[in-house]
Image: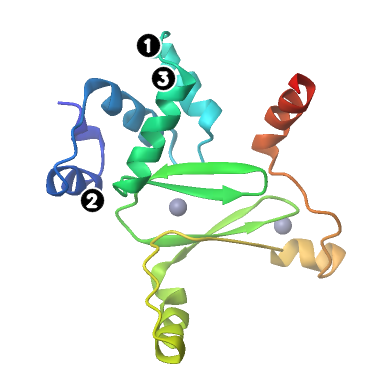
Amino acid sequence: MFIRSLNEKVQRRIRNYGFRLTPQRAMILNAIARRGEHVTFDEILHDVRNVAPSVSAATVYRNLDTFSRYRLIHGNEVAGGKLYELASEQTHHHLICHKCWGDTKIEAETVRKLFTQLDKQTGFLVLGEHYVFMGLCADCRKQDGDTLGRFHTHPKFRSTSSKRSKAS
Ligand SMILES: [Zn+2]
Ligand SMILES: [Zn+2]
């Protein structure tokens, strides 16, 4: 009853890996699925606590780690923190602009040639199915050229990092 809202690929992996989907795990997975792409830890925790106020941050964190290992979710480090999303049915990658934080989704096919070339040159097989490439989008390059200046933090992590630095 819990997994019907998750996509086919995730459902298949849950079955194939014999992953034990407890009601709590289902709740966390569904919270990620409902938010769509680029979900932060704080957003997941917020949504989960709306349903079950007593769930601890450590529990959510531990489960996210487990989901990643079972490849049920993607967690990508993006300029100041991790962004999560449910493992997608359609393999894709992201181009994220460091200045305007615009996000362009690209098909797996677009970088497959590069991976094939890497295999030929080094014998290394790239297995990751979800990459985030950070850079500058066409519009920002037109405005400011190809320079970035100092490294910026993703807007979703700005309040968290200031909270953290105040606490320490
Ligand atoms: Zn994605
Ligand atoms: Zn941009």
Q: Residue furthest front?
A: 168
Q: Quadrant of residue 155?
A: top right
In the picture, which quadrant includes the N terminus? top left
**Image location (x, y in percent) of residue 126:** 40, 72
Q: Is residue 136 visible?
A: yes
Between the C-alphas of marks 1 and 2, the distance is: 27 Å
- Verify CB contact (< 8 Å) between mark 3 and mark 2: no
Residue that label 2 marks = 9
**Image location (x, y in percent) of residue 144:** 86, 63
Relative to the observer, which residue lies in front, 99 or 82? 82
* Colour theme: rainbow
- Verify CB contact (< 8 Å) between mark 1 and mark 3: yes
Residue that label 1 marks = 52
Q: Quadrant of residue 14?
A: top left
Label 1 vs label 2, nearer the camera: 1
Residue that label 3 marks = 48
Which amino acid is tagged 2? Lys
Which amino acid is tagged 3? Val
Q: What residue is rendered at 52% in x and 31% in y? A: 41
Q: Indicate which disc, 3 or 2, sits on the residue closer to the N terminus.
A: 2
Relative to the observer, which residue lies in front, 10 or 57? 57
- Note whether 31 is above or below 8 in the view shown: above
Left or right of 145, for residue 11: left
Which amino acid is tagged 1? Ala
Element type at mark 3: helix
